[in-house]
Each structure stands twice: as C-alpha cells, then as structure tokens.
Image: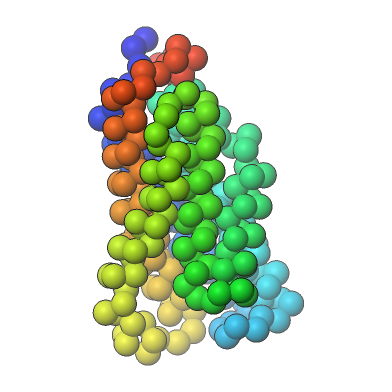
C-alpha cells in the first residue's frame, strides 16, 4: 500500500486536529463552570478541582482526534503518550494563569500541544523541519483567535453565567483551533514533500 500523499495528510490532520480543539474547549467550558460557577483569579478548591478535570478532558479529547488522524495516516498511536499530553498542557496552563495571567494560560496550552505533536510525530516519521512549525502553530492559532475575539470583547463581557463560558471557550476552539490546525497541517504537508515516509509509517489500509 502506498503512503498517503502530502495533500491527504494536510486534509486529514487539519480536520481532525481542528475538531479536537473545538470539542475539547467546549468540554472545558461546560465542566469547569457547570457546578462551581464564575471565578476571578482566586479559585476555590472545588473550582480548582473541576478546572483540572475539564482541562484534562479538553486535552484528551484533542489527543483522541489527533490519534484518529495519525492512525489513519501513519499507523502512529498517539494515545500511548497520553500521560505527556495530560500533564504538559495542563501544567503550562496553570503556570500561565498564576504567573502571568489571562490569556497567557491559553497561549501556553496551545504551545504545549504543538510542541508535543512536533516532538512525537517528527521522531516517529523521521521528518525534519516540522517540530518548530508545529510549536509555532499554537502561537498562530492564538494570535488569530485574539484578533477575532478582541472586537467581540464588549459583547462577551456582558454575558453572565454558564452561557458566557460556553460561548467564549467554544469560540476560542473555533477561531484559534482552526487556524492552528490549518497551519500545522500545511507545514506537515510541506515537510513530507521533502521527507519521504519510512515503510513502518505506511498504513495497512488507507481510508
């Protein structure tokens, strides 16, 4: 079976990663505030617990969708690295939240996901040049998301309760997640044009 074309890789990876970001941040928006309400910079123990649960779910949902892409394309099981994804992005989220403040928490989360993807997929596929671009995809998504959400701030700030968080974080998953996924997918396609896949990365049965 021949390996997937770089264009197929771009389409599949970008689609699944974007879906992971969207559904992941929607999950976070609901679970983090459904039972414990609004908060400022100081969280109660219950709020801290539910935020860790929601952030864990957010990154695992993202990982699941990415895993669907890498297994279809490369026979690469990303789920076995779940502990890295579970710890890394969540830890950097809280570092950003407490040491720098919002929205550094969001930026560091996206950067952490991009870095892990770059490290693990580049190593497995033996491709050069994608690690940096995968890392930077988090910044690209964050920057585009900030540019889109900033004009909406007066409207978003007027919302209250759970609906405010659902709208804000779901929008974040869309306006930051889609650009990040498209950028990382485009750069992965570019890397594969000059780095042929090893035989072990050829899927047994392409969709």
The quadrant the N terminus occupies is: top left
The x and y percentages for residue 137 are 38, 50
Q: How is the image coloured?
A: rainbow
Task: Give the residue at x 67% y 44%.
Answer: 83
The x and y percentages for residue 16 are 39, 42
Task: Give the residue at x 34% y 64%.
Answer: 143
Residue 72 makes an appearance in the image: no
Residue 4 makes an appearance in the image: yes
Task: Give the residue at x 43% y 26%.
Answer: 127
Query: Which residue extends farthest right?
Result: 45
The x and y percentages for residue 71 are 47, 28
Q: Could you tell whether 22 is left or right of 50 in the image?
A: left
The quadrant the C terminus occupies is: top left
Whether residue 164 is situated above or below residue 196 in the rendered picture: below
Task: Give the residue at x 39% y 86%.
Answer: 157
Figure quadrant of residue 11: top left
Whether residue 36 is situated above or below residue 109 in the rendered picture: below
Figure quadrant of residue 89: bottom right
Of residue 162 and residue 2, the one placed in the foreground of this image is 2
Query: Which residue extends farthest bottom?
Result: 158
Figure label count: 0
The x and y percentages for residue 26 are 46, 63
Of residue 189 and residue 19, the one placed in the foreground of this image is 189
């Amino acid at each position: 079976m021949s390996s997937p074309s770089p264009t197929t890789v771009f389409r599949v990876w970008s689609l699944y990663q974007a879906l992971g970001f969207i559904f992941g941040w929607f999950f976070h928006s609901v679970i983090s505030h459904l039972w414990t309400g609004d908060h400022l910079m100081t969280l109660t123990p219950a709020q801290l617990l539910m935020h860790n649960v929601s952030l864990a779910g957010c990154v695992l949902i993202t990982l699941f969708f990415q895993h669907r892409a890498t297994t279809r394309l490369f026979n690469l099981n990303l789920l076995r690295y779940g502990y890295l994804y579970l710890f890394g992005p969540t830890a950097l989220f809280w570092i950003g939240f407490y040491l720098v403040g919002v929205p550094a928490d969001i930026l560091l989360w996206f950067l952490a996901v991009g870095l892990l993807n770059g490290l693990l997929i580049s190593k497995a596929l033996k491709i050069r040049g994608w690690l940096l671009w995968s890392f930077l995809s988090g910044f690209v998504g964050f920057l585009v998301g900030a540019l889109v959400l900033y004009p909406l701030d007066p409207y978003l700030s007027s919302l209250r309760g759970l609906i405010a968080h659902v709208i804000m974080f779901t929008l974040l998953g869309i306006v930051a997640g889609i650009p990040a996924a498209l950028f990382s997918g485009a750069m992965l396609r570019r890397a594969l044009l000059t780095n042929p896949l090893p035989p072990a990365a050829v899927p047994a049965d392409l969709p």
